[in-house]
Image (spheres, rainbow, N blue to C red):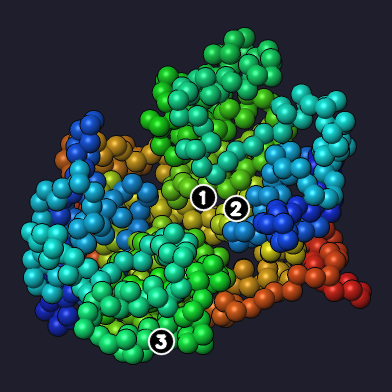
Amino acid sequence: MEHEILLDVRHLTHIFPLSRKTAVKAVDDVSFQIRRGEIFGLVGESGSGKSTAARCVMNIYQPYAGQIYYKGIDTCDRGQFRKNKKMLQTTRQMIFQDSGSSLNQKMKVRDIIEEPMRVQKIRPLRGSYEEEARFQMKYVGLDPEYLKKYPGELSGGQRQRVAIARALTMEPELLVADEPIASLDASIQAQIVNLFRHLQKEHGFSFLFIAHDLDMVEFLCDRVGVMYHGKLVETGPARAVFENPLHPYTKALIAAIPIPDPRRERARAVPDFSNTEFSRTGTLREVEKDHFVLMEGGDAG
Amino acid sequence: MVTSFLSVQEKNGMKERLKVEHLSVSFFTDEGEVQAVRDVSFSLNAGEVLAVVGESGCGKSVLCKSIMKLLPENAKIKNGKILVNGEEIAGYGERRMRELRGKLFSMVFQNPMTSLNPTMTVGAQIAEAVRAHQKDMGKEEVEQRVTELMQLVGIEQAEERKKAYPYHFSGGMRQRIVLAIALAGNPEILFADEPTTALDVTIQAQILDLLREIQKKLGTATVFVTHDLGVVARIADRVAVMYAGKIVEIGTVDEIFYDPRHPYTWGLLRSIPAFSRGKESLPSIPGMPPSLLHPPKGDAFASRNAYALEIDFEEEPPMFRVTDSHYAATWLLDERAPKVVPPIGGNTDGT
């Protein structure tokens, strides 16, 4: 059970055409796995392809090349997708960065939470749609009174909880969270991160957690992948990657995290990376157990 | 009590650029009056960086905009004084303010992608800012100044790069150009509103060091708005912590990080994930900030404050003096209050 692979992304490539002649390779030959019950973090600068990868995983984009297996089903194959459509659309759920724009402003919270159950014609576990909505609201730490409100009347943290509650009504197994805490305040970020931890530990949810806050990723994730210009340059257990980064980009990224301690931070010189182009060629090689680094040929280690 | 700490710094002989006294700003909306900034006082010296931290909606950005008078029409400065180099500007009209903006104070915004014009070369955009402040400058001189400014913000091969468009540059380079534009009028006070939030961490440190270097060179006083305490640690001389439109604690960066006194500052510092590595959960502040439409009676933080005293629900605490540079608005500092051991701070060895 521990090591069952829930999501297997193999050689995923996605290209956005810019004009008839030019195109941008947003995701370039990326492979990673998410095991059941684990939180996998994807980090990298904006534009490095994290969100595109997540959208391919959720079938929002049809990848240009590569396969994505979810519970052994090739989700990019139209035939297999159609056959398992309901399962795929209920057990995989996505939470977006800005719940201000991803929740319909003209619907009440109650309707927002109930909508996926109605669309999927799911009989709620707790009797009625409303009971289910109330239950999920309480579960994510919101007063069920808010069911009567509109998203515009809620704060950012509350809206993000509504988005999570909506996802939970589907009894998901994989939650894809694209920068779910980036737009929230420090004190609220901690609350949401604690909620994710709780969902993982108590209920065995698996997460694809996308963020650029490296401290938060290190705290929350079991394993991480580092993306740089569309390439996955390093992946492994969070501790291994943060304590022993091997790819030059990962090293730069970790060296650049500011330390929230003035005396240490001011004494520290951060090398200038602004004109550095990091290598993104080669193949992923296992340098220690589970820890892969993108490097040129030759023997690993 | 606030005024006493302001005067101390004058005595120290530092050149005071900006002094804000009892500033209150409200937005008048259909639902009623939103008190975005409530009775804020602080001062800022030449060559100093004051970081303003707090949650979104706590009034950080409104504070900057109200000093520059860039508020929308439904906002009003209700009370207070804004003194720039000793001159009261709160009553100035738009025409006077327009002369001062850029020359006296300037602003750098969060997103360099949206603050530049995509259809103009960067050289032309910097030149535009230069000409706006020195109208009688000749063409040659303007060009000269643009090159100087680009070199100042660390752009090499300025001559060639002038002719490039914003999309030719990376995010970090664009933010340097925005900074060059902001510095075109030799401002005495710079407002930087989350200037590195949209940038990659690997570039962030360079921009922060650059800001710091320029600001020391030119003696610019800087108000730096951010929510990232790591960034604060790197750049700030002093820190003001804002909550619900008020400054709840102000002090030097060392005082705030190693000897914080306000429970809200404790909460902010404790929620930094770097301090909780390997733990089950992050210490978080329960609940959420109050609505500024109807601020609660007493201390606005009381309902989220595990250390709240009875009086917190009745009366707002004044600024208590900790040292000459360190003030905090919490009843815990009253001599009648029970002694509380802070859950954080005192870790001067940096662990």
| Quadrant of residue B249 within the rendered picture | bottom left
Q: Are marks 3 and 2 on the same chain?
A: no
Q: Is residue B347 visible?
A: no
Q: What is the distance, in whole Å, between disc 1 and disc 2 at their CAs? A: 7 Å
Residue A254 percent across, percent down from the top left: 62, 68
Pinpoint the chain carrying mark 1.
Answer: A
Closer to the camera in the image, A39 or A42? A42
Pinpoint the chain carrying mark 3.
Answer: B
- Residue marked by disc 2: A211
At 74% from the left and 54% from the top, the residue drawn is: A15
- Residue marked by disc 3: B147
At 53% from the left and 55% from the top, the residue drawn is: B273
Q: Is residue B309 above or below residue A135?
A: below
| Quadrant of residue B90 within the rendered picture | bottom left
Closer to the camera in the image, A242 or B277? A242
Amino acid type indicated by mark 2: Ala
Q: Is residue A123 left or right of residue A134?
A: right
- Residue marked by disc 1: A182
Pinpoint the chain carrying mark 2.
Answer: A
